[in-house]
Image (cartoon, rainbow, N blue to C red):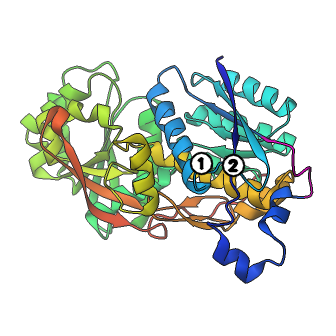
């Protein structure tokens, strides 16, 4: 695995939190930043994410967003009180075993906070390590719902799958009596998406069925015919891999896109050309895209990274959470946890809330459309859903 270590000093978030401190605190930000520990010693933070492997592009966005978020949260001075924060970056290559090994090594070297987890499989393996060692873990782009409520030491800086599916549901209004078809590949990926749609949209009154195709399929006309025959009010497409362009072209040519509302997730900008001519005919649920929000944080992020993409906000929010945890908790991880539980803050997407009961991150989500074509596609928000509108059900904390 690749390890990069840098030392950064983080400014106290006293300026950002001034109003709250004035109303509730008797001590100074310097006092809370120390957390009862050595006020001069560095706080060690480990960032374990995909620098290489299948999700390296996601990891790149995450780390660039993280660095921009640190600059924003610390007003560019990079200090929390007088304490420096020592950051070590480790490449897990999307491999849970490598991530667990890296997390254990970082904890053994004194890291109080672990962040990152580009992949869901990684997050689910690192979360128990955080609980066993009583360190703070802030998962990143990993979308699996199972991270929420994993244990008291585990948080997330990105969205979860439930929030995606609730956004998809918003395209058909009241689902009662509606017909929904899930078009997905055979296998675990398709199973998970079908189960999520049934749980979220089916439980709200829709009739959910599926059309499944082998992952090796290259001819999609038969599947398009099945979809048209079902006459759904909503077609939810969950597809991954190199056959996506052919799949979308077939759905378009066979009239599926013009016969019903077709919804899928909007991935990173580099994937947009795969939609081809179908792109402007699809309705997208979106976690984020450049221009989706107009917040102070989004402006600061854009100033640092240029074109903002899907997972930049996850890194940015993680940095905001790290600064908050260190400011309020110092060396005391339990105080860090308490400081994050129930915290409301303004992120790239807007109003964010860390739900105290299970650490779900409530946040805006978007309905989006693409205009243009190919590499010239532009995304625009058709509707923004609030954090409350997309909130997942509260789950019992597992540990």
Q: Residue furthest bottom?
A: 23
User: Does 133 sit left or right of 170 as displayed?
Assistant: right
Which residue sits at x=19%, y=32%? 375
In front of the other: 355 or 124: 355
User: Does 14 sit left or right of 106 as displayed?
Assistant: left
The answer to whether any part of residue 23 appears in the image is: yes
| Residue 212, percent from left and from top | 32, 34
Q: How far is mark 1 from mark 2, CA to CA? A: 7 Å
In front of the other: 285 or 89: 89
Provide the residue span drawn in magenta. 36-43
Assess whether residue 42 is covered by the magenta stretch. Answer: yes
Tell me the residue that label 1 is attached to.
70
Assess whether residue 350 is covered by the magenta stretch. Answer: no
Which residue sits at x=21%, y=27%? 245
- 229 is higher (above) or lower (below) than 173: above
Helix, strand or loop status at disc 1 = helix
Which residue sits at x=83%, y=52%? 333
The secondary structure making up most of the magenta span is loop
Quadrant where the N terminus is found in the figure = top right
CB of mark 1 within 8 Å of CB of mark 2? Answer: yes
Q: Quadrant of residue 6?
A: top right
Dot 1 or dot 2, earlier in sequence: 2
User: Does 157 sit left or right of 90 as displayed?
Assistant: left
Tell me the residue that label 2 is attached to.
10
- 189 is higher (above) or lower (below) than 237: above
Which residue sits at x=57%, y=21%? 93
The answer to whether any part of residue 205 appears in the image is: no
| Residue 240, percent from left and from top | 35, 30
| Residue 178, percent from left and from top | 27, 63
Helix, strand or loop status at disc 2 = loop
């Amino acid at each position: 695995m690749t390890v990069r270590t840098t030392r950064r000093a983080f400014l106290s978030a006293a300026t950002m939190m001034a109003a709250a401190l004035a109303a509730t605190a008797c001590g100074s930000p310097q006092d809370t930043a120390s957390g009862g520990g050595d006020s001069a010693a560095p706080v060690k933070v480990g960032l374990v994410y995909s620098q290489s492997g299948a999700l390296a592009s996601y990891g790149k966005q995450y780390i660039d967003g993280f660095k921009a978020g640190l600059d924003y949260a610390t007003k560019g001075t990079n200090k929390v009180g007088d304490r420096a924060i020592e950051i070590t970056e480790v490449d897990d290559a999307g491999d849970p075993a490598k991530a667990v090994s890296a997390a254990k090594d970082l904890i053994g070297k004194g890291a109080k906070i672990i962040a990152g987890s580009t992949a869901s499989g990684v997050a689910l393996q690192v979360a128990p390590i955080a609980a066993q060692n009583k360190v703070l873990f802030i998962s990143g782009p990993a979308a699996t719902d199972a991270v929420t409520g994993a244990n008291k030491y585990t948080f997330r800086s990105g969205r979860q799958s439930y929030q995606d599916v609730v956004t998809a549901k918003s395209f058909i209004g009241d689902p009662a009596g509606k017909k929904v078809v899930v078009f997905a590949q055979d296998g675990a990926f398709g199973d998970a998406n079908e189960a999520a749609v049934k749980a979220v949209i089916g439980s709200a009154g829709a009739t959910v069925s599926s059309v499944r195709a082998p992952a090796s399929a290259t001819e999609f006309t038969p599947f398009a015919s099945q979809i048209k025959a079902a006459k759904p009010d909503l077609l939810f497409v969950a597809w991954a891999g190199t056959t996506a362009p052919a799949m979308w072209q077939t759905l378009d040519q066979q009239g599926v896109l013009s016969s019903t509302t077709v919804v899928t997730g909007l991935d990173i900008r580099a994937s947009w050309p795969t939609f081809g001519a179908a792109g402007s005919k699809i309705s997208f649920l979106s976690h984020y895209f450049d221009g989706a929000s107009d917040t102070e944080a989004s402006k600061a992020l854009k100033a640092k990274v240029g074109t903002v993409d899907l997972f930049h906000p996850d890194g940015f929010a993680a940095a905001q959470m790290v600064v908050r945890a260190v400011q309020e908790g110092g060396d005391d991880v339990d105080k860090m946890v308490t400081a994050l539980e129930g915290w409301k803050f303004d992120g790239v997407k807007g109003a964010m809330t860390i739900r105290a009961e299970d650490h779900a991150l409530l946040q805006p989500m978007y309905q989006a459309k693409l205009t243009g074509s190919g590499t010239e596609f532009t995304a625009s928000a058709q509707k923004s859903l609030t954090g409350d509108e997309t909130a997942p059900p509260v789950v019992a904390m597992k540990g």
